[in-house]
């Protein structure tokens, strides 16, 4: 049995086991098959339209007088090309309608009728669904995102239909309408690609390139797209495939801060080299089959050497792998991306960069503080709090950093906070200048302190520096404490209201 690649927090290896499922998700072909539908309500009309769109011949059993206006309108519509038919029988349903049917659906007014319909279908061996009566359903309909041949269905096992609809709306925003055309193109190319390219890296590289084009914009595939893509298979078949590296910003920790492009890169990776600061919830979004390798670098702790990380990226890419170098925050902000890009280019390995939300931006959002509030700051600076030797860089221009109209955020500055305070005060910055310290930004372990510059040593003693620390200095942080208190109060009030609501009948 294949083994699951575990993250560093999950302990020892274990066999792959799927979490329990409330229902089995099945995509069932109904083209040309008979489906019986009892009832003429609006709800029944929606089911008829859905089944007809799947190519089924929908036999509706309901007296003419019981048909809703929506259902009556559906009966006179001309079906779309490839769709099934809606055939109306002007009589109530009876047990004899079940024979030869693929599915049986009904909209029943009471439980007695629902039970009768359910039993009739079960005896006939026909899967059955009674609308809005879970006790009489052998299967359920989910919320649907239609990009056919791409179809996404969402189910909450009947527990929260509104939640399913909200999930559907979110997925709708992720999948452009043009995906329908790209999926149809993939369907037409599949056999040809399988003939031309061997399974494994060459074939995977082709389809990854295809997906990149499909999601690159909002345009449907052009008429020449098929020929262009098939030309690419000839080049791939005739040469040894070299992999590529994508530097991906994981943001400060909260997986919801990831960009859509970052998620797509994680889903396409063969190998993920991730930093120690990358959260487990971010890694959970990666492709299940991807190999995950911790290459963490933390100040003051045993770390993987940059030279070793470079060698791993080069060797894996040469072996045809798509390597995702997953970095906390934004790889282009204190992430050593420049060094890695240079070495990869030197070895002729394709490299791409997906930016992430840097920690300072996340900190500003969490504190409800604008780093460039026009009443306080005309510039913002991100400054490293330590050099290669772990001390403050000797090249920092402290006179410039002491400018009261500039917001300054020091990264990785926990161990050098005292020296930062000393240098800024020596250059004339006011002792009363507002300052904040935030550790583990946007994580459940986040801690905050706010005060004045001359109290920075008090703040760092309270917060500590075992976790990543940001220090913000400037007039914009004057409201940080008040904003935090208001946010905390609002959150507490909401929790109290939620708890009271849960007690109501």
Image: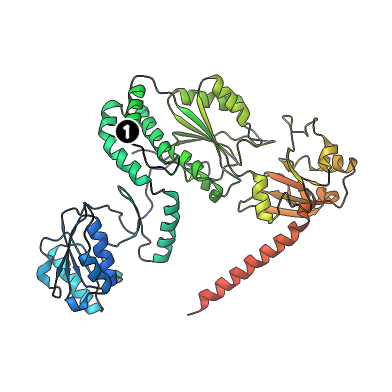
Looking at the picture, how far across and down is residue 7, in whole percent? 50, 41
User: Residue at 66% of width from left, 35% of height from top?
Assistant: 334
User: Residue at 13% of width from left, 67% of height from top?
Assistant: 123
Q: Is residue 11 visible?
A: no
Q: Nearer the viewer, residue 225 or 395?
A: 225
Looking at the picture, how far across and down is residue 444, in whole percent? 61, 54
Apparent side of residue 501 relative to residue 36 in the rendered image (left or right): right
Apparent side of residue 274 relative to residue 461 in the rendered image (left or right): left
Q: Nearer the viewer, residue 388 or 52?
A: 52
Q: Is residue 444 visible?
A: yes
Please tell me whether residue 244 is drawn above or below residue 88 in the rendered image. Answer: above
User: Residue at 36% of width from left, 24% of height from top?
Assistant: 236
Q: Secondary structure at mark 1?
A: helix
User: Residue at 37% of width from left, 34% of height from top?
Assistant: 207
Q: Which quadrant would the N terminus be assigned to in this image? A: top left
For label 1, count other residues whose C-alpha is less than 10 Å away and answer few (under 14), some (14-19) or many (20+). Answer: some
Location of residue 288 by image quarter: top left
Please tell me whether residue 120 is drawn above or below residue 411 in the rendered image. Answer: below
Please tell me whether residue 86 is drawn above or below residue 439 in the rendered image. Answer: below
Looking at the picture, how far across and down is residue 285, in whole percent? 47, 45
Location of residue 77 by image quarter: bottom left
Residue on which the image places disc 1:
226
């Amino acid at each position: 049995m294949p083994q699951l690649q575990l993250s560093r927090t999950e302990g020892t290896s274990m066999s792959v086991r799927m979490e329990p499922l409330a229902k089995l998700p099945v995509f069932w072909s109904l083209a040309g098959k008979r489906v019986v539908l009892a009832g003429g309500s609006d709800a029944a009309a929606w089911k008829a339209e859905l089944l007809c769109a799947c190519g089924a011949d929908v036999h509706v059993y309901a007296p003419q007088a019981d048909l809703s206006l929506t259902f009556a309108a559906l009966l006179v519509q001309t079906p779309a090309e490839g769709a099934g038919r809606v055939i109306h029988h002007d009589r109530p349903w009876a047990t004899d309608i079940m024979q030869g049917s693929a599915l049986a659906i009904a909209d029943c007014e009471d439980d007695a009728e629902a039970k009768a319909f359910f039993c009739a279908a079960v005896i006939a061996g026909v899967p059955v669904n009674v609308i809005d009566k879970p006790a009489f359903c052998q299967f359920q309909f989910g919320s649907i995102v239609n990009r056919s041949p791409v179809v996404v269905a969402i189910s909450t096992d009947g527990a929260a239909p509104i939640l399913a609809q909200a999930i559907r709306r979110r997925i709708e925003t992720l999948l452009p309408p043009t995906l329908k055309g790209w999926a149809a193109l993939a369907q037409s190319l599949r056999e040809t690609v399988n003939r031309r390219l061997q399974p494994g890296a060459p074939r995977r590289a082709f389809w990854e390139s295809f997906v990149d084009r499909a999601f690159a914009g909002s345009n449907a595939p052009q008429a020449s797209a098929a020929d262009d893509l098939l030309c690419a298979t000839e080049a791939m078949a005739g040469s040894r495939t070299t992999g590529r590296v994508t530097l991906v910003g994981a943001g400060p920790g909260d997986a919801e801060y990831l960009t859509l492009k970052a998620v797509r890169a994680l889903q396409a990776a063969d190998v993920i080299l991730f930093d120690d600061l990358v959260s487990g919830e971010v890694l959970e979004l990666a492709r299940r089959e991807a190999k995950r390798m911790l290459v963490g670098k933390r100040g003051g702790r045993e770390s993987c050497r940059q030279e070793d990380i470079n060698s791993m990226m080069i060797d894996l890419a040469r072996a045809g792998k798509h390597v995702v170098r997953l970095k906390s925050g934004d790889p282009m902000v204190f992430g050593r991306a420049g060094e890695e890009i240079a070495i990869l280019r030197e070895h002729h390995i394709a490299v791409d960069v997906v930016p992430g939300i840097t920690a300072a931006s996340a900190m500003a959002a969490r504190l409800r503080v604008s780093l460039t509030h026009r009443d306080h700051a005309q510039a913002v600076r991100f400054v490293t709090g330590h050099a290669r030797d772990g001390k403050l860089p000797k090249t920092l221009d402290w006179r410039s950093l002491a400018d009261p109209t500039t917001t300054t955020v020091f990264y990785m500055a926990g161990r050098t906070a005292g020296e930062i305070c000393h240098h800024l005060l020596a250059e004339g910055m006011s002792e009363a200048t507002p300052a904040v310290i935030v550790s583990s930004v946007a994580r459940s372990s986040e801690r905050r302190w706010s005060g004045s510059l001359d109290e920075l040593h008090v703040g760092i003693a309270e917060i500590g520096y075992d976790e990543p620390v940001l220090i913000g200095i400037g007039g914009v942080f004057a409201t940080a404490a008040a904003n935090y208190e208001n946010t905390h109060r609002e959150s507490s009030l909401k929790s109290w209201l939620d708890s009271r609501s849960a007690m109501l009948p």
